Amino acid sequence: MVCALLALPAAAQEVPRSLAAPTENVTVSVIKDGEAAITKYVEGMSVPTRVAGKMARWKDGICPIVVGLPADAARRMAGKIRALAAKVGTPVNPKDSCPGNVEVIFTGQPQALLDYVRIMYPVLLGYYDNSAQADKLATSTRPIQSWYITKTLDLRGNAQVDGVRKGGGGVRITMPVPGYAYGGPPMALQVLEMSMPDAALTNVTCSRLGDGLSSALSNVMIVADTSKLVGRDAENVYDYIAVLALAQIVPPDACQPLPSILNLFAPGCGDAVPTSADTAYLRGLYKITTTNTFASQRRELDYQMNQTLKAKP
C-alpha cells in the first residue's frame, strides 16, 4: 500500500512552503464544568465501526510514512506520531523499514489525489456499501482529512477486514417440512441450500456487556491540503495529524468546550494547541474493554478521561 502511495502522480506530492515555523507548545487543560465537557468530547469524537459497532484502536504496531514534505520535516512528522503513540499506549513497530500502515500525504491538490485513490486504490477509503458512498468518501472537504480501514476480531482472535468481500459460500440445512399434525406420521425431511457470498464464520458470546467481537485499525490514510495550511504553525499541524493517526475520530465542525488540538480547524476556536485532554482521550481509548458494547466503551472512556484529568495538578 505504501509503495502505491509513493508512486502517486507528482502533482499530489508538492512540497508545502507556507507552513509557519514550528514552535513548541503544550497546554495543560483548565476545564470549566469538566465532567460535562469530557462527556461531550467523548460523544462527539468517538464513532463505532460499521461492522462490529465498536471503537477501533491499533492492535498491531503502527508504522507511519510521510510523503510530500522535505526529508527532515517528514522525519519529524513521523517521529511525532511515534512519540505520541508510545506516550498513550499505542503499539509501535520499532523497525525503521517497517511496512507502513499510517500514510500521511501533504499535497496542494488533494482532490486530484483522492480521484486517483478512488479509481486505483479504493480500499484506502475504508468501509463503504456502494459507489455513491465511495464517491462521497473520496471528496476533499477539510484542510486535513483521515480515512480508516478497520477490521473485526472475533472471540478467538480471527480477523476480517471490514468491507472486504469474504468469499462466503453455501450453507446446507436439513429440516422437517411443516404441516403435519401432532400424532400424525413422521415429518418428511427437506434439504435447503442457501448461498451467502458475504458470510463469515465468527465466534461470539451472548453476554449483555459484549459479544466477544472487537474492532481494530488496519490502515490510516491522512491527507493534508497545503493550500489551506497557509500561516499555520507546523507543530500544531503535526500534533493534529498525530491524534488522527491513533484513533478513528471525527473532528468537530464547531468549537468544543473542552480544549483540544482537534479544535484547530473549527471556526471561532482561536489558536488551538495540544492539551492534556488529547492525551487523556487516547490513553483512555487504549485502556477500555475492546469487546464491550459501544455505549459501555464510551462510559469507560469518559471515566478514564475524568480520572486522568482530575489527577493533573
Image (cartoon, rainbow, N blue to C red):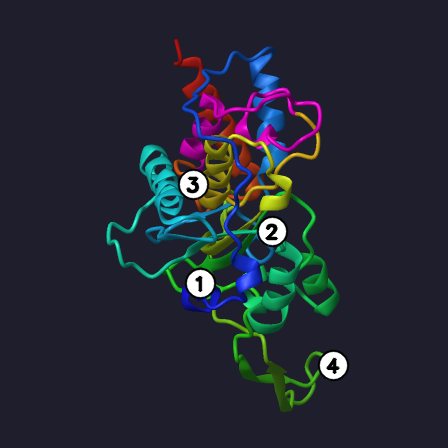
Q: Is residue 194 above or below residue 231?
A: below
Specify the amino acid type for callout 3.
Thr
The residue under label 4 is 181
Q: Neighbour class for label 2 at 10 Å: few (<14), some, many (≥20)? A: many
Which residue appears farthest toward the front when viewing the image?
Answer: 17
| Distance from the alpha carbon under mark 4 to that under mark 3 | 50 Å
Instruction: Return the residue at label 1.
Output: 203
Q: Which mark is residue 108?
A: 2
Residue segment shown in magenta: 256-285
N-terminal-most mark, 1 or 2: 2
Between marks 1 and 3, how big is the CA–CA gap?
Answer: 18 Å
Residue 231 in the image, given as x and y percentages of width and height? 58, 32
Q: Within 10 Å of the Cα at label 4, are there few (<14), some (14-19), or many (20+) other Cα atoms?
A: few
Q: Given the image, on which type of amino acid does mark 2 rest?
A: Gly
Residue 202 in view here: no
As drawn, 97 above or below 167: above
Q: Which numbered disc flags the more N-terminal residue, 1 or 3?
A: 1
The secondary element bearing badge 4 is classed as loop
Q: Hey, which residue is sitting farthest top in the picture?
A: 313
